[in-house]
Image: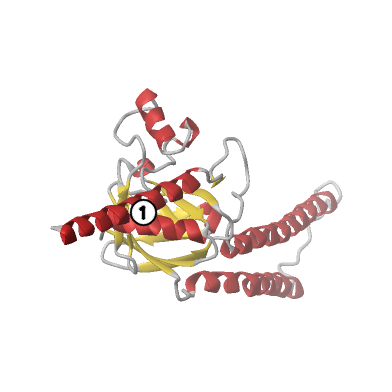
Amino acid sequence: MQMMTVAKRLGLAAATTVLAQMASAQTAIEDLEIVGAPTPGATGFQPAATELMRDLVWLDGFLLVIITIISLFVTGLMAWCVLRFNAKRNPEAATFTHNSPLEVAWTIVPIVILVFIGAFSLPILFKQQEIPEGDINITVTGYQWFWSYEYTDEDVFFESYMIGYNEGNLNAGIIEQLEEAGYSEDEFRLATDTAVIVPVGATVVMTVTGADVIHSWTIPAFGVKQDAVPGRFAQLWFNAEREGIYFGQCSELCGKDHAYMPITVKVVDPAVYEEWLAGAKEEFPA
């Protein structure tokens, strides 16, 4: 009897410790800043939170410079042709049919430009597709219309639904749910009831698939997007460099509720992640 009492006390102490860890981690998680979210009326990208996204932002600016130069050149050339070769200045039309040097030039120059662009864009593409060894491995499955996540190395599994899903437009009940989860009404249709938690600075490899139709998992601030195809497994990776809350959406038209399967990823301090993980193993056993 005495040994049973001691065992019960030890079990109670362990449970109390886990609950304390979960409460501490939850407080730290709820205090996170929202970093990756759409801004009404804004243009451009969300703040880059990974090396992959920084590369994409740089490539976008690089291509914009090239495209602007080409556009200005073509516009100027057209204006010059209109002024130089109009019927008023040239009452007698020219009789030549072609210009070999010019035709060779407008064939070779675009090829050179495309090769130049490829020399900078292909390494960025390869960096996305060459999957490194992950510190954290997560299997993501898209459903009509929610996501499931399995931390395959940690035996943690949970499903993630939009807060207020199937409850109509924004109302007092949904606002209360959002506030309980640490959000405001501005995050309606962005926030989920359960978020993916990862530590800052860790390499996360996600294996993506679909259970019914094609979905697509994406976080714009991470610069990642991968179709979730039923019967196939594809991978993406990221290494978040900044703590915060990041939102994404299913990016492949998947049915009537396609707009209602958002993605929430919370990047936390490694110590907070370990505390959350200890509680998640109890709360979300695989």
Q: Give the quadrant of residue 153.
A: bottom left
User: How is colour applied across the structure in the image?
Assistant: secondary structure
- Tell me which residue sits at (49%, 60%) in the image: 271
Q: Give the quadrant of residue 174.
A: top left
The percent coordinates of residue 221 (x first, y second) are: 55, 53
Amino acid at the residue labelled 1: Thr
- Image check: 39 left or right of 143? right
The percent coordinates of residue 20 (x first, y second) are: 39, 49
- Tell me which residue sits at (84%, 49%) in the image: 83
The percent coordinates of residue 66 (x first, y second) are: 72, 61
Q: Residue furthest front?
A: 2
SS label for mark 1: helix
Q: Is residue 189 visible?
A: yes
Q: Residue furthest top?
A: 172
In the displayed structure, 137 sits above or below 14; it is below
In the displayed structure, 12 sits above or below 231; it is above
Q: Residue furthest left?
A: 1
- Tell me which residue sits at (57%, 64%) in the image: 52
Residue under label 1: 17
The percent coordinates of residue 252 (x first, y second) are: 38, 52
How crowded pointer 1 is (Cα within 10 Å; few <14, some 14-19, many 20+) is rated as some
In the displayed structure, 146 sits above or below 127; it is above
- Tell me which residue sits at (48%, 75%) in the image: 132
- Image check: 91 left or right of 245? right
Q: 232 or 74, which lies in front?
A: 232
User: In what quadrant of the picture does the C terminus appear?
Assistant: bottom left
